[in-house]
Image (cartoon, rainbow, N blue to C red):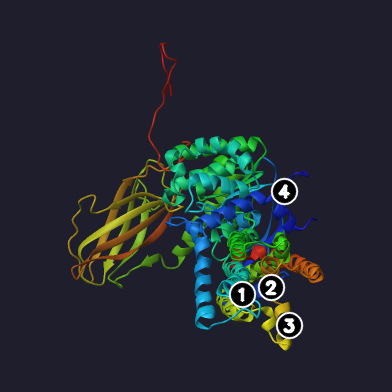
Amino acid sequence: MTSPIIQTWTKRRELLIALTKRDVLQKYRGSVLGVMWSVLNPLFLLGIYTTAFGVFLHMKWDAEHTGLADFAIMLFCGLVPFTYFNEAISRSATAIISAPNFVKRIAFPTEMLPIVVNTSALVHVFVNTLILIAAVGIAHGTLHVTVLLVPLIWIPVILGCIALSLVVAAVGGFIRDLTHIVGVIFSVLFFLSPIFYPATRVPEKAQFILFVNPIAYAATNMRKLIVLGETPNWLSWAGLTLISLLALWLSVRYFFALQRRFADVL
Amino acid sequence: MSSDTKIVASGLGKFYPHRLETLRLLRYLAPWPQRHTAEDFWALRNLSFRLEPGKALGVIGRNGSGKSTLLQLVAGLLEPSEGIINVNGKVAALLELGAGFNPEFTGRENVFLSGSVYGYSRAEMAERFDEIVEFAAIGDHLDQPVKTYSSGMYARLAFSVAIQVDPDILLIDEILSVGDLGFQAKCFRKIEALREAGTSIMFVSHDLNAVQMLCDEALFLDEGVSRGFGEPREIANAYVQMLSERVRLGKQHDPVVDSPTGALATIRNVELLNARGENTMHPSAGERCRVRYKVEFYGDVAEPVVTMQLRTMLGLVVSDLTSVFSNTDIPPCAKGDVLDVDFEFDCNLCPGPFRIGASIAGLHDGVPASICGGEFLTIEVVSSQRAYGIAFVDSSLHVRKAGEAGAIDN
């Protein structure tokens, strides 16, 4: 028996595209600026954080990057993966309970619900990364060739996030408190992840926090590839990809075990 | 028994938790099968049946008898708590109104979205699109958000999509009842065509006529347990029989009476008399009958109104007769007064069971109030003449070939 997730990705590709489009459009339908908001939102956030941390608190990124533009760019590198995880996981927590039509009334592949949350969030990641690269290009006048490796870095990050989303969605189908718990966790994660400070500032003893945090991995490597022009550590990349694949396999099995119970409690 | 049997259920059962409290739901998180606890109730128990290609199975039973649970199990929306259900082929399920439609999106967008849920590509749906639109006949509304649709339009579009995706099994839960009669007829023709092409159908309905017309077999569920499986006419009769037994059972104790304003009056001695004035439960179709009852008052009621209700077993009102419609003035009543009420009517009903109710209303302390009422009798109309339906229409028939002399009279 082939893994159901493989069937999902091949047979259901069009459904995924249609649902993602629907999800992205629905969010902005009826608003004047429409999809432009997906660009404006992170830019506003970036502006606020840069003002608060860079201007008010006079934070410098590190010895080599002391300018405000550098600070903003480094901050944005961390903000993109954080926003992705925050959006994907928070929305997964309510993905099942907010779609009773799909769960109770038609033979809908409910695993699509947390997956669509991810693809929809990834549309924002894509747009934001392009803005980030453009900003670096303007600020530095040139781009590193390592920018081309950015999609590779995201592979374990996305797989890991989908794995987490599936588990959170499955549990969230029964435990409605989960959405609040997730909210608290992400408030904490914003400060525990190297978003407005470099990973190297984390004390030696606390470095393990970075290893278990995919946001930290994505943030650090976005900075390496886009801003610094360094290549990632391929060994840890391969290791992470393997771990995230394993996590995905387990989470898919878990989701499918719980899938047909959602209708019992909705 | 063939290898391409569409549905095989054996020992199928499903239980639900009694209360949905977060802590009790924790057990759902364990990825192994659920065990039944004292807190759970069985919605369906020990059900076995099979459905062959091209056959239609009607499922009947009262509300809460497990019909919808069964359809959800077949559709794969629920996990069986015990037993096995094997479903062989693509299932199109019309379980509830507007199933799977997103209210914010237009009919057109929803058609393609539903198509992809059924596993069809955009191109494949585009081929079917014209037929879907033609069948649904919702005109310009196609490009309006479905939240603006009437329930009829919703159902038409949902049904049109479901039948155009070439399902192997079509599940229908009451949905046809919202369409107008013309659309219903069209649906039934389409369902017939699908059956000839080998689609199996499971049809849940309160409409016993539709079940008998449409289905090869029927399943009668009561409190989650099968009370009969077989020829639709027999099963429908068994169902009606059960309904009338329930009412008679009620009569042996106290009649079902509600008196919202307290015991201002009670209705007693409800009886049906035939044309010869004899007490009967089996009037003949067309016979002049009387329903007679007594109302005993325990308080003051100004302007009393008496009513008699005639209903089918399924609760459809055949006729409500009241002292208002017949302009019968009833004097004000006080404590200790007794009214003798006598409704006389032509029993123009087709053979079969009917229910008779009685009630009294009036002004109490100047406020209109429903005083007492309930269902008291279940009768069975009999006839030597063949008739089918609800109303017994006195009729004659004349047929002749146009242009020929002499009619074939009946």
Disc 1: CA contacts within 10 A as few (<14), some (14-19) or many (>=20): some
Residue placed most toward the observer, B6 or B303: B6
- Label 4, on which residue? B88
Farthest-out residue, front: A141
Residue B25 numbered tag: 1
Given the image, on which type of amino acid does mark 1 rest?
Leu
Q: CA distance from mark 1 to mark 3?
A: 34 Å
Please give the chain letter of the residue carrying mark 4.
B
Residue placed most toward the observer, B100 or A212: A212
Q: Depth-wise, is mark 2 or mark 3 nearer the camera? A: 2
Q: Secondary structure at mark 4?
A: loop
Given the image, on which type of amino acid does mark 4 rest?
Asn
Q: Depth-wise, is mark 3 or mark 4 nearer the camera? A: 3
Residue A220 numbered tag: 2
B90 lies above or below B248 = above
Q: Secondary structure at mark 3?
A: helix
- 1 and 2 marks in contact (CB < 8 Å): no
Instruction: Tell me, yes or no, whether dots 1 and 3 are on the same chain.
Output: no
Q: Residue at x 44, y 38 (%)?
A: B139
Image location of residue B323, percent across then percent down: 24, 54
Image location of residue B378, percent across then percent down: 44, 55
Given the image, on which type of amino acid does mark 3 rest?
Phe
Image location of residue B181, percent across then percent down: 44, 39
First-in-chain label (2 vs 3): 3
- Label 3, on which residue? A208
Q: CA distance from mark 1 to mark 4?
A: 32 Å
Q: CA distance from mark 1 to mark 2?
A: 39 Å
Q: Depth-wise, is mark 1 or mark 3 nearer the camera? A: 3
